[in-house]
Amino acid sequence: MNRVYNFSAGPAILPEDVLREAAEEMLDYKGSGMSVMEMSHRSKVFGTIIQEAEADLRELLDIPENYKVLFLQGGASQQFAMIPMNLMKNKKAAYIVTGQWAKKAFQEAQLYGEAVKVASSEDETFSYIPDCSDLEIPEDADYVYICENNTIYGTKFKTLPNTKGHTLVADVSSCFLSEPVDVSKYGILYGGVQKNIGPAGVVIVIIREDLITEDTLPGTPTMLKYKTHADADSLYNTPPAYGIYICGKVFKWLKEMGGLEVMKQRNEEKAKLLYDFLDQSKLFHGTVKKEDRSWMNVPFVTGKQELDEKFVKEAAEAGFVNLKGHRSVGGMRASIYNAMPKEGVEQLVAFMKKFEEEN
């Protein structure tokens, strides 16, 4: 078996233990005589799978009782519309634009009301997080929106914005479960699971119960109301059953590893290895302000496009795949999510040193 080191931003690396276990259960899940892929979502067996997944996630994040956990579809991008449809009571919301996904969410919100851009880092290609300690947030804004970790640009909010009493909504797709989080600071935190948790096709929404109401914008489809899914425990229609099953396995893996405190330490160590090398390298350099660097997504460049291309090609041949940066920014990007072992980063750094010497 020839496993590569997969630095993809998503769909991304999954824990090998989880993949092996899923493979063992592929034809017969716990004596049911069938695969989870073939199983009715209304069955007792699947009911146990989704309930356990939710219970484990609640335990990992210490989710307060007045929050619902929803397993939905449509990815983070569908939440860009779902959030204003459900939350824009005053038809006004504040957006902090720190990358392409926050920008897309901001643009989508304009379809439903007045989206106010209260801060942005677009002036420097989203290479930093703006100071959000004293923003001019409209009094009547329904919520303040952030993308907490910017996958493309490799930035991360280390301090949450001062929302001045307004509900905070955060897209945490690429930092989900990478460290402990105080869920009570958010009205909604949500993320597509295909970066740090599971296979593509599931988006998890953790939402405070007072934000789940019948009072949505006129014309909101039944499927895009949080209440529809909350009332049905994510089983209003057929959910992405197999994806939820894998997420459940990853939650158990995280618990076995020691939980989110341990993951935070591991992730800090891995990122430090890579950033320390970039900071002293004469060929490669990072593109993000030091204090705003993400632990999950590390963009870097050589400064020459042809050299970047040569590096990506030679790295892939050596078993380090998906290091090409996002098409909008170029260069390279190593996504080093929870499931990336430390040795993967160590070996990447060793390869980069060798490449630097030869070029």
Image: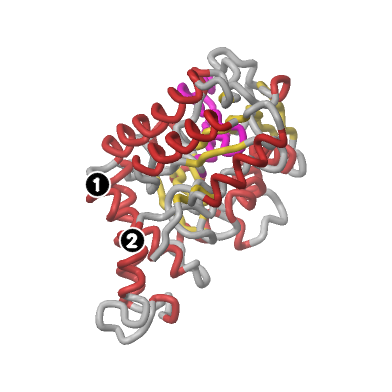
Q: Nearer the viewer, residue 192 or 152?
A: 152
Look at the image and give the residue range highlighted in magenta. Answer: 147-173
At 49% from the left and 67% from the top, the residue drawn is: 240
Residue 199 placed where, x, y %? Answer: 48, 60
Q: In terms of depth relative to the viewer, which is nearer, 270 or 151?
A: 270
Q: Is residue 244 magenta?
A: no
Residue 90 visible? The answer is no
| SS for dot 1 | helix
CA–CA distance between discs 1 and 2? 12 Å
- Rendered-image quadrant of the N terminus: bottom left
In the rendered image, the vertical position of residue 99 relative to residue 49, given as above or below: above
Q: Which mark is residue 18?
A: 2
- Determine whether the residue tagged by mark 2 lies in a helix, strand or loop: helix
Q: Nearer the viewer, residue 20 or 71?
A: 20
Q: Which quadrant of the figure contains the C terminus?
A: top right
Residue marked by disc 1 = 257
Mark 1: give few (<14), some (14-19) or many (20+) Cα within 10 Å. few
Quarter of the rendering containing residue 154:
top right
Residue 142 falls in which quadrant of the image? top right
